[in-house]
Amino acid sequence: MRLRLHRASRWLDRRRRRLTRRLAARFRPRTMPRQAWLLLWLTALAVVVAVTGALAPRWVPASAMVFVLLLGGFFLRLRTMVLLYLVAAAGAALTVSVPDEGGLSARPGDLVLLGATAVLVALFVRSRERLGVQGTLGDTMLVDLRDRLRSQGRVPPLPPQWHVETELRPAFGDSFSGDFVVATRTHGEQGDLLEVVLVDVSGKGQGAGTRALLLSGAFGGLLGAMPVEGFLPAANAYLLRQDWAEGFATAVHLAVDLGTGDFRVRCAGHPPPGTGGAGVPWRLLDDDGGPALGLVPDADFGEVAGRLLPGQALYLCTDGMVEVPGEDLSVGTEALVRLAEEAGRSGWRDGAAERLVDAAAVEESDDRALVLVWRSGA
């Protein structure tokens, strides 16, 4: 008997809670959607502009409705924007219907300006709607993506005698570049290891920026999570899986033991790195690398090993740093080696990578990137 009463009590309690939720949902005050509020405020602004234009047409012409349309383009969706167009057209008609002191209702140029603005705002809103954002949110997203791409290339803290500088220069001064850097520092069986990858994605500027962003995240996850010799093969397999029309990229992978100075370099279709200093002539490392990433399955990437002694340096660069107009690629490569040798004679200082990029006689029509690693004297 007690069990039946308990079950009945629980059933009544559930029914009571369900009925309470239904009543609360039915009588809850409904909030107006954000787009409706924005349309209401902009409609009120259009009415104010139209009435003011009717009362003082010399001070508020029909073209003043352009301001309302521009605000709508930043905050409204395309469907809501159509309603604002109707309100703006009615307001402009009211302003035109009232002649000014000279007997003119409106200048034809004002109406042409208003119509042209309406067309441009419609195109603007349509492009934003493809992204699913309104106003300047799309620009904010691009800025955030650019900052994330740059943050991937931040070099972790290093021992006092080790220094790494990166310098990225997008083509034509754009904010996005097809060149990017990924760096990490790991402590494991291979010692205190610094790994740096410099990648040049096919294309240039903003066209390559989106692919660079995707690859930087993928390469950042691979770097340090697998053996040094397995990074480029894994990156190559990842690019092949993307099946992009312009799906190739060149890369150079540097791994440096921060305890001994021993380094290993692997290239994938990239210009060879240069090293020297501390009485040792500057030279190009033997280019035993493999093809560019994303072209050949199961490609083999050769390794070049060496040691950075105190006072010596090593640089990695993209092809934008060595492509001299009208000259063979070897001419620009040798010129960069000479520049590095001259810069290292007086000792390496902060800002050395930036000065090397500035000194290179190359065009700004291609992305340029340089990574400079040096070991200060004891």
Image (cartoon, rainbow, N blue to C red):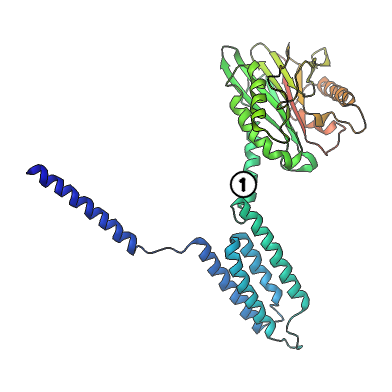
Q: Which class describes the residues within 10 Å of circle 1: few (<14), some (14-19), or many (20+)?
A: few
Give the percent coordinates (x, y) of residue 215: 65, 32
- Taking depth in this image into account, of 243 and 324 the one nearest to the observer is 243
From this viewpoint, is residue 309 visible? no
Q: Quadrant of residue 136?
A: bottom right
Give the percent coordinates (x, y) of residue 151: 63, 34
Picture residue at 59% right of the left edge, 60% below the top? 77
Secondary structure of the residue carrying tag 1 is helix
Quadrant the C terminus occupies: top right
Q: Quadrant of residue 361?
A: top right
The residue labelled by disc 1 is: 141
Picture residue at 71% right of the left edge, 29% below the top? 199
- Taking depth in this image into account, of 363 and 161 the one nearest to the observer is 363
With respect to residue 196, does 279 lie above or below?
above
Q: Amino acid at mark 1?
A: Met
Q: Residue furthest left?
A: 1
- Taking depth in this image into account, of 281 and 370 the one nearest to the observer is 370
With respect to residue 375, does 69 lie above or below?
below
- Taking depth in this image into account, of 151 and 358 the one nearest to the observer is 151
Quadrant the N terminus occupies: top left
From this viewpoint, is residue 291 visible? yes
Q: Residue furthest right?
A: 326
Picture residue at 87% right of the left edge, 26% below the top? 329
Give the percent coordinates (x, y) of residue 141: 61, 46
Picture residue at 74% right of the left edge, 20% below the top? 267
Give the percent coordinates (x, y) of residue 313: 76, 19
With respect to residue 317, does 5 lie above or below?
below
